[in-house]
Amino acid sequence: MVVAYLLLAVAIVSEVIGTISLKMSDGFTKLVPTIFVIVGYLGAFTALGLGLSKGLSMGVAYGIWAGCGTALVAIMGIFLFKETINVWGFIGLALIIVGVVMLEMGSSHS
């Protein structure tokens, strides 16, 4: 099961790289970020699929992948792109993180 969670972590990091690169690609007009978009998403879906084949529950894996990816992309947007976030945004990020933790705590592992 450790391998499955490592693959899930790779999927999350790859998805975050792909999404950040999507912003940097400027509508796919910049070659290098566009390549990172393709490689990032390909890596994300590959690692997620392999994690699912190693025993991760689909609902839990997708919830963790989407939740962590969303939270990390929002945080990276603040630091890399000087995007602003208000109190409600921070509360929303906290709720995403709490939701992911609760989803994991409520899952049953084989």
Image (cartoon, rainbow, N blue to C red):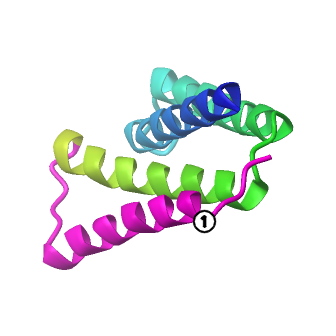
Residue 104 position in % (x across, y down): 56, 57
Magenta segment range?
Answer: 81-110
Label 1 sits on residue: 106
Picture residue at 56% right of the left edge, 53% below the top? 64
Residue furthest to the right in view is 53
Picture residue at 62% right of the left edge, 25% below the top? 39
Residue 74 position in % (x across, y down): 32, 55
Q: Quadrant of the N terminus?
A: top right
Residue 35 position in % (x across, y down): 57, 24
Q: Is residue 77 left or right of residue 14?
A: left
Quadrant of residue 66 within the rendered picture:
bottom right
| Chief SS of the magenta region | helix
Residue 91 located within the stretch drawn in magenta: yes
Between 83 and 28, the residue placed more toward the observer is 83
Between 80 and 50, the residue placed more toward the observer is 50
Residue type highlighted by circle 1: Gly
Q: Is residue 3 left or right of residue 94?
A: right
Residue 98 position in % (x across, y down): 39, 66
Residue furthest to the bottom in view is 88
Residue 105 located within the stretch drawn in magenta: yes
